Image (cartoon, rainbow, N blue to C red):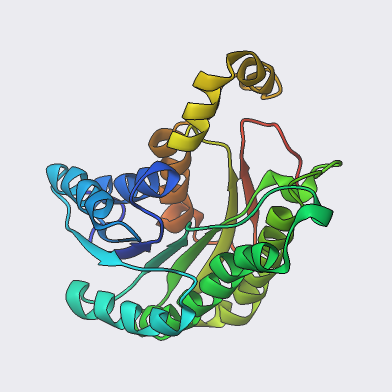
């Protein structure tokens, strides 16, 4: 028996990295998982890992910047898996760099894949969650929002700060419907970060030393398991919060 038996979860960007880790953790507690992303081969690989654990998983191609398509994807998920209880907005595609060197299109891309996409998924999932007596939304943000020096991270931090505000608003407005909404701000050894640590070991070691717990989080055990706790019954009174899953590196007021 798992803490999420009978629940249905949507995880965007679940073909690899943090999204995959979250999907695996949810499935390990009994949830059926809609695995969303842009590359079918990666989605199928995640689904196979989930099925090996005895849970149900279905892949759904999704380009989150195409917000007009999101309601139909959500309806397809609900139809195939029997409803929606959990939404994890993990997918993000944005730009990094100094503000003066960034184009308007690059700056806006982070908003389209971040708060705009999350807003569309949240609205589309709301009636399904309400019909099942409630649900839980987890949106991924970043500690870059609160860095004293966000140089080269300005566009990223701006989009994620907007998503954080959106999450808090949903928590306030949708609480009466039994829907909780929280953020996590993770550090995790995703494929991209792992490549960076291998290519630049000295810089990676300096980064690791800034983390009080002394290591970069594991996508499933440190991030995915925390999401399991957030969406499960033990934290049913927590909503509107931002949880820093960063080993103590950043402070959220």
Please indicate whether residue 60 sits to the left or right of residue 95 in the image. Answer: left
Q: At 72% across and 54% down in the image, what residue appears?
A: 157
Q: Nearer the viewer, residue 1 or 207?
A: 207
Q: At 79% across and 48% down in the image, what residue appears?
A: 98
Q: Is residue 207 visible?
A: yes
Please indicate whether residue 130 sits to the left or right of residue 33 in the image. Answer: right
Q: Nearer the viewer, residue 14 or 65?
A: 65
Q: At 41% across and 86% down in the image, what residue appears?
A: 127
Q: Residue 129, position in %: x, y?
A: 39, 78
Please indicate whether residue 27 sits to the left or right of residue 247 in the image. Answer: left
Q: Residue 124, position in %: x, y?
A: 43, 82
- Res 126 → quadrant: bottom left
Up the image or down, 115 lies above or below 206; here it is below
Q: Residue 153, position in %: x, y?
A: 73, 48
Up the image or down, 170 lies above or below 186; here it is below
Please indicate whether residue 61 sits to the left or right of residue 115 in the image. Answer: left
Q: At 36% across and 82% down in the image, what residue appears?
A: 128
């Amino acid at each position: 028996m798992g803490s999420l038996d009978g629940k249905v979860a949507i995880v965007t960007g679940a073909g690899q990295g943090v999204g995959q880790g979250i999907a695996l953790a949810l499935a390990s507690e009994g949830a059926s998982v809609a695995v969303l992303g842009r590359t079918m081969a990666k989605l199928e690989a995640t689904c196979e890992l989930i099925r090996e654990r005895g849970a149900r998983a279905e892949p759904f191609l999704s380009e989150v910047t195409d917000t007009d398509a999101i309601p139909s994807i959500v309806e397809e998920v609900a139809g195939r898996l029997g409803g929606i209880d959990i939404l994890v907005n993990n997918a993000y595609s944005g730009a990094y760099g100094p503000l003066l060197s960034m184009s308007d299109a690059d700056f806006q891309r982070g908003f389209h894949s971040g708060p705009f996409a999350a807003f569309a998924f949240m609205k589309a999932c709301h009636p399904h969650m309400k019909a099942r007596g409630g649900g839980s939304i987890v949106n991924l943000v970043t500690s870059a929002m609160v860095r004293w020096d966000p140089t080269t991270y300005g566009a990223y931090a701006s989009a994620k700060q907007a998503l954080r505000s959106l999450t808090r608003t949903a928590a306030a407005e949708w609480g009466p419907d039994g829907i909780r909404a929280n953020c996590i701000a993770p550090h995790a050894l995703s494929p991209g970060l792992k490549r960076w640590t291998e290519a630049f070991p000295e810089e990676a070691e300096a980064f690791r030393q800034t983390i009080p717990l002394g290591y970069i989080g594991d996508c499933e055990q440190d991030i995915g398991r925390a999401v399991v706790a957030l969406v499960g019954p033990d934290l049913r009174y927590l909503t509107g919060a931002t949880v820093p899953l960063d080993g103590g590196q950043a402070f959220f007021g």
